[in-house]
Amino acid sequence: MKSKIIILAAIIITRLFSIYFFGVTEENYIKSSNEWGVMVSILEKYHMLGFRIVDGEVVPTIFMPPLYPIFLYFIKNLTPNLNIYILTVQLFQLFFSLISTLYMHKILSKFFSEKISFIGTWIFILFPLNIYAVSQISSITLQILLTTLFFYYFTKLIIIQKKKYVIFFSIISTLLIFLRGEFFLFYIFTTFFFILKKKFKVFIISFLITTILVSPYLIRNYKIFGAITVTKSLGFNLFKGNNPRSTVEGSPMLNLEDIKKLSTETYEKLIKIKKQDKYDLIIDNIYKEDAIEFILNNPLRYIKLYFLKLFAFIFFDLNSTYQNYYNVFHIIPKILISTTTVMGIIFTIIKKNLLSFFSLYYCLNALIFSIFFILPRYSLSLLPIQIILTSIFLEKINEITQNKSG
């Protein structure tokens, strides 16, 4: 009980410290071109999910997932001014961080000794980027919470099949799909693991529940765009990460003038598109076609870039332009946890047990995201897995130490 109180106190104190000293303020919120802020503003004024204004009118979006902007919109309507709104979002995110830590400890306790679970939990609590994330208007803290819950109920279902666990797992999966459209791929991968473990009933029930819950939004997108999908931004992300000026971080594309600097041909195609409901879908297809053309015209450049992205995802970016990226409080913890994660993956390959799932999940994320571009927050979304894999490494070191002393 005492240790839990200390853990809760550490979470609250460190996150409040981050909010006070590094948090978003009213001034920099207004100055920034935050994509979530744009969607919330459109929801307020036009009562529709939109991300772009074309010819003075809002067009429906298929580009951005709906969960986080709806969450922000809900809070915005409950708060009297911008300062209170920002603070309320940050406090919610502190709460998300607190819950994710408690469930992180529960996961670790299933697989590791009390000592290793305790160490892993404290790494999760004190990881600098995890502390900093709470202070920003970003979906990453909510993503970490839902990801942690997803893995918690996944491990529960592997051990014992209970209807309530299947329901919780499916609801959380649906929320993650609404938060990150690409999560659907990782959901399919995870449910396929149920088949490998001969949990056929879990697979069927979960797939049905998740499909039913996602279907209203799929129907909305099919009616507007003629596409059965939650989000459609593959082309944009592929173009941003694979064009003549792209780096590991992609390339800045805030408006048409930025795109004009990157590719005159793409710019000319985009400005010809008139205002219509399928606007998002049409421009995404243009981005996809042009990105593929860039890759085919210079494959060696983009193969090399792919491996630089992969290295940046697993370890660190060799040439990051992000402010304070190479600050010792960021880069040293990142290198350390990256190294222990890789060591944990090696040990799971040797043992070939349930923990191999987490290694495969992590590797799949790294391989897929490196096709596009790598931002610092991407690896943070996999912090729960990194903690698990790091704990595998620590357990092994503990075993070796005990054997030598024995």
Image (cartoon, helix red, strand yellow):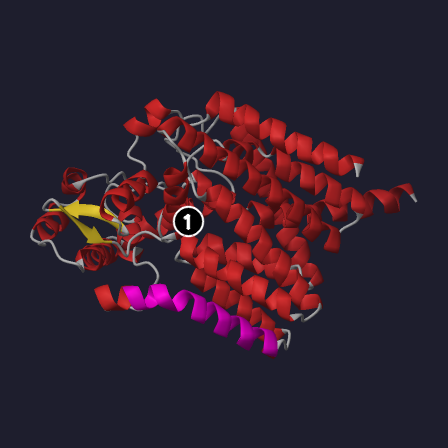
- Most prominent secondary structure in the magenta stretch? helix
Outermost residue toward the right in this view: 406
Q: Is residue 368 above or below residue 31?
A: below
Whether residue 197 appears in magenta in the rendering, the answer is no
Residue at mark 1: 307
Question: Disc 1 on helix, strand or loop?
Answer: helix
* Amino acid, disc 1: Phe
Residue 274: x %, y % from top left: 8, 54
**Displayed quadrant of residue 252:** top left
Query: On the rendered structure, is 86 left or right of 331?
Result: left
Instruction: Name the one closer to the observer, 373 or 141.
Output: 141
Q: How many marks?
A: 1
- Please tell me which residue is depicted at 44% across the width and 63% down the height of the picture: 185
Residue 253: x %, y % from top left: 24, 40
Looking at the rendered image, the quarter that the N terminus falls into is top right
Q: Is residue 311 above or below residue 368?
A: above
Outermost residue toward the top in this view: 21
Q: Is residue 405 above or below residue 167?
A: above
Looking at the rendered image, the quarter that the C terminus falls into is top right
Whether residue 208 appears in magenta in the rendering, the answer is yes
Residue 128: x %, y % from top left: 56, 31
Query: On the rendered structure, is 94 left or right of 49?
Result: right
Q: Is residue 221 above or below residue 15?
A: below
**Displayed quadrant of residue 338:** top right
Range drawn in magenta? 201-220
Residue 23: x %, y % from top left: 45, 26
Does residue 321 appear in this view? Answer: yes
Query: On the rendered structure, is 194 left or right of 283?
Result: right
- Please tell me which residue is depicted at 40% across the width and 34% down the height of the picture: 79
Does residue 381 appear in this view? Answer: no
Label 1 Cα crowd, 10 Å radius (few <14 / some 14-19 / many 20+): some
- Please tell me which residue is depicted at 25% across the width and 52% down the height of the picture: 298
